[in-house]
Image (cartoon, rainbow, N blue to C red):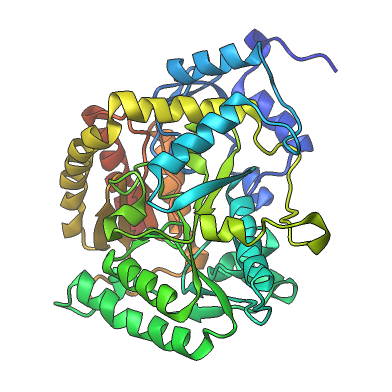
Amino acid sequence: MNAIPENQLHSASLAARDLRVLWHPCTQMKDHETLPLVAIRRGSGAWLEDFEGKRYLDAVSSWWVNLFGHANPRINAALSAQLDKLEHVIFAGFTHEPAVRLAEQLVALTPPGLTRCFLADNGSAAVEVALKMSFHYWRNRGLPQKTRFMTLQNSYHGETLGALAVGSVELYKTLYKPLLMDVLTAPSPDSYNREPGESCEAYALRQFAHMERLLAEHAAELAAVIVEPLVQCAGGMRMYHPVYLTRLREACTRYGVHMIADEIAVGFGRTGTMFACEQASISPDFLCLSKGLTGGYLPLSAVMTTEDVYAAFYDEYTNLTAFLHSHSYTGNPLACTAALATLDIFATERPIESNRIKAAYLGQRARQLEDHPHVSEVRQCGMILAVEFVKDKRSREPYPWTERRGQLIYRHSLQNGVLLRPIGNVVYFMPPYIVDETEMDLMVQVAADGIELATCD
């Protein structure tokens, strides 16, 4: 079938064609009987534009991936140049300049001791790689009984079966439990649950006592603990104090258990430092990276690990200790090129420094919502800010999930030119780093009006 000329397209017709053939992620497709799909024609900077010319401020970085704006000139130019050289090559037995340079730069940028880079396709794949590497490491080291994993309550690590197993957001997990491995779950250090007057640090330390007890009890069978450093994103942008990570790193070393840091969503400056682990001054055994790695352009993930882990697999072929995980598009040159261009922007434009000013402005604007009678908390970690709205402010009783009040805010935001995608009763901002004060004002105002609309019974 021939493509329809762009000048004959419009949003409604493209959406109608979509609904005849496509199935969208994380979506009850029946909703689109009343909630129109938004057909996007182009993107530029922090904005998306539909076929009628209406613009939408991308306040969620298109599912947290876009760092430096849509159609970024530097990333575009790098990809254009690479297209004329090499689009893809098998990565078993072959290599190429973009992959080597990317691995070298990631080794230099990530926390000390992470000297080996394994490339995969997306965030869930990175988590699968880290889980399998940890399990396989202990087997190669003569400790085959270390087969279990521990996670935090309210965590999310992806939706392939291994990644889903080590998450604990029941919305995603409950139906598939018969397919999943059994894991241990420790209480979350989520600061939202601290007692009145209790500091975030004190609460994190109190919650770590539960993790310590589980580690002591199960160390002999545990391969690794996996956590999202500082922010549990899909669990409602819940945040916790870095002291928890410091204690966890110490305990994992003491008990002989790997620490997996899933920085797929929080890496590359989102929390105010290049990597969230830096705020606890720790190095995990495995660091999972994706999303912002390519600036939002192409699927790519990386698992950074140690020389000790690498050495456990380095052996004669006949001993069958090799790590045999693979993806057809491993090390794709175009994706690696996009990642290199993204890292070059970090190196030359120093966005983390300018983000401190932007984050302070965004926080100052959003904290005005703390006085709203249905807002229980405004919380922030770097360029991630969340507003939690509730049925009862005093008791923090949430609205029933079946009322879908977040969807009212989503609809309202689209009508007013902003893309917000609340997680349940949490409205959050995770904008591209190029956002300016006027755009932040718009995000906050539209969110405030949306919350008022959604909570005025």
- Direction from residue 43 to residue 96 in the image, left or right: right
Residue 139 lies, with reference to residue 54, above or below; the image says below
| Residue 350 in view of the camera | yes
Between 4 and 284, the one nearer to me in the picture = 284
Q: Residue 16 sits in which quadrant? A: top right
Residue furthest to the right in view is: 1
- Counting the numbered discs, the total is 0
Q: Residue at x 62, y 19 (%)?
A: 10
Q: Residue 180 sits in which quadrant? A: bottom right
Figure quadrant of the C terminus: bottom left
| Residue 52 in view of the camera | no
Residue 196: % across, % down:
17, 78
Q: Residue at x 67, y 44 (%)?
A: 24
Figure quadrant of the N terminus: top right
Q: Residue at x 45, y 88 (%)?
A: 216
Between 111 and 407, the one nearer to me in the picture = 111
Residue 296 lies, with reference to residue 359, above or below; the image says above
Residue 110 lies, with reference to residue 203, above or below; the image says above
- Direction from residue 179 to residue 70 in the image, left or right: left
Residue 92: % across, % down:
75, 39
Residue furthest to the front in view is: 316
Residue 210: % across, % down:
38, 85
Between 243 and 384, the one nearer to me in the picture = 243
- Direction from residue 142 to residue 171 in the image, left or right: left
Residue 313: % across, % down:
67, 59
